[in-house]
Image (cartoon, rainbow, N blue to C red):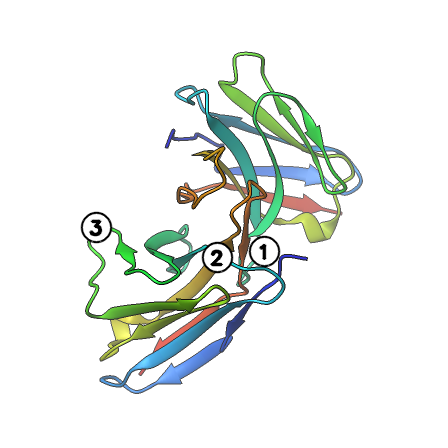
Amino acid sequence: GAVVSQHPSWVICKSGTSVKIECRSLDFQATTMFWYRQFPKQSLMLMATSNEGSKATYEQGVEKDKFLINHASLTLSTLTVTSAHPEDSSFYICSASRATDLGYTFGSGTRLTVV
Amino acid sequence: DAKTTQPPSMDCAEGRAANLPCNHSTISGNEYVYWYRQIHSQGPQYIIHGLKNNETNEMASLIITEDRKSSTLILPHATLRDTAVYYCIVRASNAGGTSYGKLTFGQGTILTVHP
């Protein structure tokens, strides 16, 4: 149980375009989902926390207008990187939690390359 | 959330026990200790978590000192596939079961299991 699916696993896009990444909890309802970004040889950095039906809470320094997060249902959250630039190239990872103390489940990540 | 300190890297021979230490001297009474690992280019994988008592599951054992200021993750018989970055994280838990606090990742310990 507790499977989180992230799609796509990798994407290449042109500079200036937008990219949407999906995060789905397959066998449980996720009250809270988190989005992380990871640059090469670095640790995961939390970008934002989203709760179903409410606005996401962004970490300091993360541009909310650039990284749009939607958590419209208990099983789906999306991250849209708008007007992507090469410096947005990174590994994006989502995680989801249930309303019980069983830890977090992470998706397999999305490798974004902006050219 | 309390911060953690881990050695940057460790080596272990295949088949031997891997003991990964973590210091969390500022941990609060309601904070759990979580361990995750990340294999290259994948999302983090939950290993184990605990509050006060030692815990064991099919993957590992978690030993928490009586004062809770440090803990050790034990992989009893390390294999080559256990080579990964291991993260020790402390996080407050909401006993009421509502939405959780975020997981903040440090730099972790790079565990290399060699033949």
Q: Nearer the viewer, residue B52 or B26?
A: B52
Give the residue at mark 2.
Answer: A95
Q: Is residue B16 above or below residue A84?
A: above
- Picture coordinates of residue B5, whole percent (x, y): 44, 30
Q: Is residue A9 above or below residue B64?
A: below
Residue drawn at x 23%, y 58% as measured from the top left: A62
**Could you give the CA–CA distance between mark 1 and mark 2, rounded to whole angstroms?**
16 Å
Q: Are marks 3 and 2 on the same chain?
A: yes
Residue drawn at x 34%, y 69% as measured from the top left: A70
- Chain identifier of the residue bearing label 1 in the image: B
Circle 3 crowding by C-alpha within 10 Å: few under 14, some 14–19, many from 20: few
For residue A22, what is the image quadrant?
A: bottom left
Q: Secondary structure at mark 1?
A: loop
Residue type, numbered disc 3: Gln
Circle 2 crowding by C-alpha within 10 Å: few under 14, some 14–19, many from 20: many
Residue type, numbered disc 1: Ile
Residue A60: assigned label: 3
How many numbered dots are placed on residues in this image? Answer: 3
Give left or right: position of A109 versus B46: left
Q: Nearer the viewer, residue A20 or B65?
A: A20
CB within 8 Å, label 3 to label 1 = no
Q: Nearer the viewer, residue B6 or A75?
A: A75
For residue B4, what is the image quadrant?
A: top left
Residue drawn at x 54%, y 60% as measured from the top left: A29
Residue drawn at x 49%, y 56% as measured from the top left: A96
Q: Is residue A67 above or below residue A84?
A: above
Circle 1 crowding by C-alpha within 10 Å: few under 14, some 14–19, many from 20: some
Give left or right: position of B67 versus A56: right
Residue type, numbered disc 2: Ser
**Could you give the CA–CA distance between mark 3 and mark 1, rounded to whole angstroms?**
28 Å
Give the residue at mark 1.
Answer: B39
Give left or right: position of A15 versus B85: left
